Amino acid sequence: MNAVAPLKQLAARRQRRVDIVSLQAGALSARDDPVVVEEALQIQVAGAAPVITMRTPGHDCELAAGWLLGEGIIQRVDDIERMAHRRGRPHELCVVLKRCGATQAQRLQRAAPANSACGVCGKSQLNLESLQGLAPLSPGPRVDAELLCSLPQRLRARQELFAHTGGLHAEALFDATGKLLALREDVGRHNALDKLNGWALFSGQLPLAQRIVVLSGRASFELMQKCIVARVPLVCAISAPSSYAVSLARRHGVTLIGFLREGRCNIYSAPERIRGADALAVPGLSQPA
């Protein structure tokens, strides 16, 4: 079987060329331009109402599995009985869980993703139940700040679809030596992280106790919640963190890095995983913001 053909077909599904008028160097011209595809995915979990999310096509099963994991509906891959697209309907995904008791049903009802932009838009209430009863994080790796500052460039070098369209978020998983293990792109940053966590679930990588997650944008509380559920000890954001993300990181012992650039970064919590930073006495870094 030729593995290149499915990859080309997936790439074609994820971007589309549109006609535009371009202004460059003071001159107008007509041309076409690649844009990332955003389409609806219906996730039907047996026993619950269907939910809709807007996503970039590809890795749909990872997306659904990561979403279920982040909401505390599943904890391991064995919790899934069956997951597949409806025949002839690539935008409808059916999921059957091995166990779906009252607790799971209630969480499914509250955990309805509504679009690609906001992890809580459309929900009836804030859901942090997936963080309840978690064991303390493992000590995790100790790394040099210089290593962390090299990761955004390594992430960008592998963002093939972003290079063509400029319209995607990416979340990446690295080991403690800076080796890229997995990367997922999507129009929604929450979707990209769900796909990454879904990959880890299906690959038998959970918990991610010795790994580093790099977020291509800002660190919101929803992304921090998903990382905590996956037991990630070190989360790096290329942009800014929110106050709630900082609070969750400090409460759960996650090392949160923001404004990660070449040669610079800010450490918002648990500095003991960064060599040299643990020698600085900053008591507030271990307290909720």
Image: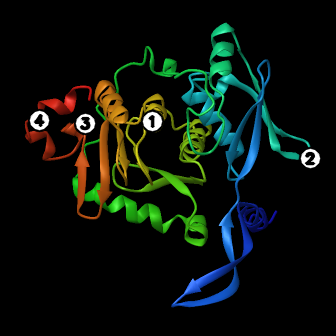
Q: Is disc 2 in contact with disc 1, using a CB cutoff of under 8 Å?
A: no
Q: Look at label 2 and name its amino acid.
A: Gly
Residue reaching furthest right? 88
Residue assigned mark 2: 88
Q: Which residue appears at 41% of the width and 36% of the height?
A: 232
Q: Which image quarter is the N terminus in?
A: bottom right
Which sits earlier in the primary sequence, circle 3 or circle 2?
2
Q: Nearer the viewer, residue 244 or 93?
A: 244
Q: Position of residue 138 (x, y in %)?
A: 33, 29
List the residue tagged with mark 4. Answer: 282
Helix, strand or loop for disc 2: loop
Q: CA distance from mark 4 to mark 3?
A: 10 Å
Q: Which residue is mark 3?
A: 269
Instruction: State the CA–CA distance, disc 3 to disc 2.
Output: 48 Å
* Spatial CA span between label 3 and label 1: 14 Å
- Give the residue furthest to the top: 102
Residue 208 occupies which quadrant of the picture? top left
- Horizontal arrangement in the rendering, residue 245 relative to residue 120 (left or right): left
Against 187, residue 100 (above or below) is above
Counting residues from the N terminus, which is met first, the one under dot 2 or under dot 1?
Answer: 2
The earlier-in-sequence mark between 4 and 3 is 3
Q: Which residue, given by chain and number where applicable, does mark 1 sit on?
A: 227
Give the spatial CA distance, label 2 vs label 4. Answer: 57 Å
Amino acid type assigned to the residue bearing label 3 in the image? Ser
265 or 140: nearer the eye?
A: 265
In space, the residues marked 2 and 1 are separated at their CA atoms by 34 Å
Which of disc 1 and disc 4 is earlier in sequence? 1
Q: Amino acid at mark 4?
A: Val
